[in-house]
């Protein structure tokens, strides 16, 4: 009997397994996923009846476009291996795809949901682009057709513009990092805005603009960013994060740059409107000046002085008339008083048997005298002193 050590047995089993199952494709549900600090991913794949352990080492794990999640159904390309120290076999995974869905499509949705939850897509944080930029930057491939399209449209629409070009890879494994680095550098150079983009291609070709590192660079930039990637039907993560999404690179120029010809026409129109406005304003001011001249003439000092002289003249005539009238009235009153005085003068009242009675030098009615009062009886010719001896009422 050939007696084997445990190590020898495990070695033979390992050789047999790895020779017989060097490439297997397994479908199942992920569970017990552990993302190790080393970059390796440890997990189990199971169905309703069985479970098998699996590992995806750092080199292969770094190529995954999506994140493994608990309960996700996947298809695994792997080799069956035995971990000799424990005698436990496991799947060494080379590639993992979501069941019924492409890995890139899933990765796209996962990152989109993650960034949305972090507020990367909020419209309230979108920055406004200036209407008349002076200096902008293109972050794209210097040899791509997209750059030539953008330069052609810019030269046609708005020639008074400084454009800097940051040449980057727009596809491939290192494209995302070079794009993100170019955004970080350009953001420090005080551009009015930055256009990040490339021409059309497959989802794999455009994938650099779906990477989180590019989304982070766009979100962190203080300069407005325009995403102009692919064709109108293509939507990438950078479209959602940027301040403005353009359906194509050439459309980005049409959306962000004013049209010089339209500006000339607008200036001509504004000039005409301005001239018409000035002429109308001058006409209105002329009319206003004429009106003010008439008002001034009607209310001038000379006019008011003549008016006052006229008023003085009229007042003088009125005053003279009033004085004459008052004098006439006074004269009439004097004449009437004189007549009354004359009519009451004792010489005009000198009738036989009548005299004026004075008591204490004052004319008095005879009824006011009392017995014993001394009085004078006067006419215009004679004065007699007398004394009341007796007072009787004549019935």
Image: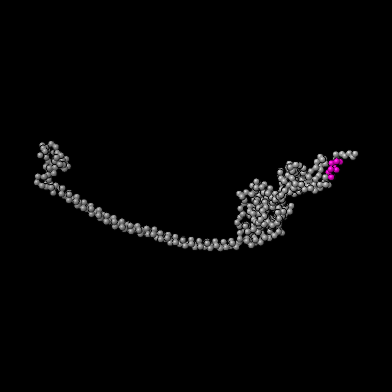
Query: Looking at the picture, how far across and down is residue 67, in whole percent?
Result: 71, 46
Query: Looking at the picture, how far across and down is residue 7, in whole percent?
Result: 85, 40
Number of numbered labels in the structure image: 0
Q: Is residue 47 magenta?
A: no
Point out the image quarter for the N terminus.
Answer: top right
Query: Looking at the picture, how far across and down is residue 44, in whole percent?
Result: 75, 42
Compare residues 262 and 285 and report the one nearer the observer: 262
User: What colour scheme does the image use?
Assistant: one colour
Point out the image quarter for the C terminus.
Answer: top left
Query: Residue reaching furthest right?
Result: 1
Q: Quadrant of residue 139?
A: bottom right
Q: Is residue 10 magenta?
A: yes
Which residue corresponds to the image point at 85% horizontal and 39% vertical from the top-left?
6
Which residue corresponds to the image point at 54% horizontal and 61% vertical from the top-left?
270
Instruction: Classify residue 221 as left or right of residue 6.
Output: left
Residue 73 appears anywhere in the view: yes
Compare residues 301 and 227 and report the one nearer the observer: 227
Instruction: Classify residue 291 as left or right of residue 100.
Output: left
Q: Quadrant of residue 13?
A: top right
Compare residues 366 and 13 and report the one nearer the observer: 13
Residue 221 appears anywhere in the view: no
Which residue corresponds to the image point at 61% horizontal and 60% vertical from the top-left?
259
Which residue corresponds to the image point at 80% horizontal and 41% vertical from the top-left?
88
Query: Residue reaching furthest front?
Result: 49
**Residues rendered magenta in the picture:** 8-16
Query: Looking at the picture, how far across and down is residue 160, in whole percent?
Result: 63, 60
Q: How would you classify the magenta stretch by its main secondary structure?
A: helix
């Amino acid at each position: 009997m050939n007696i084997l050590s445990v190590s020898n047995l495990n070695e033979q089993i390992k050789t047999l397994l790895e020779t017989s199952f060097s490439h297997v494709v397994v479908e199942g549900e992920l569970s017990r996923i552990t993302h190790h600090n080393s970059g390796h991913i440890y997990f189990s794949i199971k169905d309703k009846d069985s479970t098998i352990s699996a590992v995806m080492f750092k080199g292969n794990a770094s190529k995954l476009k999506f994140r493994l999640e608990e309960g996700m159904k996947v298809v695994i390309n792997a080799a069956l291996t035995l971990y000799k120290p424990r005698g436990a076999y496991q799947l060494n995974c080379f590639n993992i795809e979501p069941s019924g869905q492409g890995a890139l499509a899933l990765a796209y949705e996962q990152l989109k949901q993650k960034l949305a939850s972090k507020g990367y897509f909020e419209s309230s944080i979108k920055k406004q682009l200036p209407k008349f930029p002076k200096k902008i930057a293109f972050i794209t491939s210097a040899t791509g057709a997209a750059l030539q399209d953008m330069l052609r449209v810019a030269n046609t629409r708005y020639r008074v513009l400084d454009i800097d070009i940051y040449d980057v890879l727009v596809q491939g494994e290192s494209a995302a990092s070079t794009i993100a680095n170019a955004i970080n550098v350009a953001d420090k150079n005080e551009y009015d805005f930055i256009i990040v983009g490339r021409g059309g291609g497959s989802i794999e070709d455009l994938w650099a603009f779906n990477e989180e590192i590019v989304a982070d660079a766009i979100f962190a930039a203080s300069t407005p960013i325009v995403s102009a990637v692919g064709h109108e039907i293509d939507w990438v993560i950078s479209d959602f994060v940027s301040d403005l999404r353009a359906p194509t690179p050439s459309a980005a120029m049409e959306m962000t740059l004013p049209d010089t010809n339209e500006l000339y026409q607008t200036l001509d129109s504004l000039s005409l409107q301005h001239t018409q406005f000035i002429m109308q304003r001058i006409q209105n001011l002329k009319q206003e000046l004429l009106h003010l001249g008439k008002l001034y003439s009607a209310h001038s000092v000379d006019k008011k002085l003549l008016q006052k002289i006229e008023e003085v003249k009229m007042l003088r005539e009125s005053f003279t008339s009033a004085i004459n009238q008052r004098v006439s009235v006074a004269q009439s009153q004097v004449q009437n008083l004189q007549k009354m005085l004359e009519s009451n003068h004792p010489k005009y009242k000198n009738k036989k048997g009548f005299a004026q009675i004075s008591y204490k030098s004052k004319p008095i009615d005879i009824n006011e005298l009392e017995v014993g009062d001394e009085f004078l009886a006067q006419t215009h010719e004679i004065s007699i002193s007398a004394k009341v001896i007796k007072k009787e009422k004549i019935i």
